[in-house]
């Protein structure tokens, strides 16, 4: 399943770009349908959140929608293929929401010694995440997602060279035009996949997934590359 549903702000959502791609519709028509729903019933506005995507250096509007928003929007999509895609979306929403619930249901300490051990583990983990040099102090302090282009630049590589480096180190592999983490690094919270909209040579709005690195993922890269003797430019000795 091609990332039909993603987690955003602790909620399972899909995007208008992804819906347009999946159901073979022009993105502008999907936006018009969402705007019409909001105009007809203001209560639906809570089901959709505005967003933006970049295409050829310009920003364009898009929407994120939760399960209810998608269900309401997709009610007007008909045909055998449309039904098949709706079922795929329902499955994707169920799986993503179940994963979110599993992560939230952490076991509580049963007694005082267990609580102390949990506290010690938490403090040890916090110590590991403390910034350790100029790179971690200035760059990893940013809690947002970061593109591979920015990370590569910090290490003195081009994006293409850096992606090949991570591939050679067994961290990621390429599927189509998207880089993905190998299984041992998946589900660690290192990356987040987001839809990237673009217009192809035929003038048709398309969507492609792009992988961005979380703060935890950037810390992982820093520690992993440091173990290989690869340091960011700000920490390289002259």
Image (cartoon, rainbow, N blue to C red):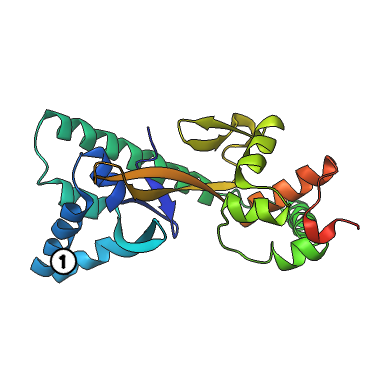
Q: Seen in the image, is 40 located left or right of residue 197? A: left
> In this rendering, does residue 109 appear at all?
no
Q: Is residue 106 left or right of residue 221?
A: left
Q: Which residue is mark 1?
A: 38
Element type at marker 1?
Answer: helix
Count residues near mark 1 (Cα–Cα under 10 Å), then give few for <14, some for 14-19, many for 20+: some
Who's the residue at 69% across and 30% down the image? Answer: 168
Position of 203 relative to 10 (above/below): above
Where residue 64 appears, x then y in whole percent? 32, 57
Q: Is residue 157 left or right of residue 37?
A: right
Q: Nearer the viewer, residue 7 or 214?
A: 214
Q: Position of residue 77 (x, y in %)?
A: 12, 42
Q: Position of residue 4 (x, y in %)?
A: 34, 41
Rendered-image quadrant of the C terminus: bottom right
Work out whether 176 lies above or below 123. Answer: above
Tell me if I can see residue 26 in this picture: yes
Name the residue: 75% across, 61% down.
136
Rendered residue at 23%/55% (across/down) = 69
Q: Position of residue 189 (x, y in %)?
A: 58, 47
Residue located 41% across and 47% down the image: 6
Residue at the extreme front: 201
132 left or right of 70 in image: right
Quarter of the rendering occupied by the N terminus: top left
How many numbered marks, from 0 up? Answer: 1
Residue 125 drawn above or below residue 168 = below
């Amino acid at each position: 399943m091609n990332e039909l549903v993603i987690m955003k702000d602790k909620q399972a959502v899909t995007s208008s770009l992804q819906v347009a791609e999946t159901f073979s519709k022009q993105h502008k028509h999907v936006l018009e349908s969402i705007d019409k729903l909001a105009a007809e019933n203001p209560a639906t506005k809570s089901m959709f959140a505005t967003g933006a995507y970049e295409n050829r250096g310009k920003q364009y509007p898009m929407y994120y929608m939760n399960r209810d928003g998608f269900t309401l929007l997709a009610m007007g999509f008909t045909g055998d293929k449309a039904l098949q895609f709706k079922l795929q979306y329902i499955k994707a929403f169920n799986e993503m929401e179940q994963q979110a619930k599993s992560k939230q249901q952490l076991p509580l300490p049963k007694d005082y010694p267990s609580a102390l051990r949990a506290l010690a583990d938490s403090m040890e983990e916090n110590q590991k995440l403390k910034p350790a040099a100029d790179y971690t102090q200035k760059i990893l302090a940013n809690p947002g997602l970061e593109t591979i282009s920015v990370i590569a630049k910090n290490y003195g590589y081009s994006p293409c060279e850096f992606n090949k480096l991570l591939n050679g180190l067994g961290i990621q592999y390429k599927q189509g035009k998207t880089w993905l983490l190998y299984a041992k690094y998946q589900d660690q919270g290192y990356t987040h996949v987001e839809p990237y909209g673009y217009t192809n040579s035929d003038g048709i709005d398309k969507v492609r997934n792009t992988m961005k690195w979380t703060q935890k993922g950037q810390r992982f890269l820093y520690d992993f590359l440091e173990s290989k003797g690869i340091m960011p430019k700000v920490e390289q000795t002259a």
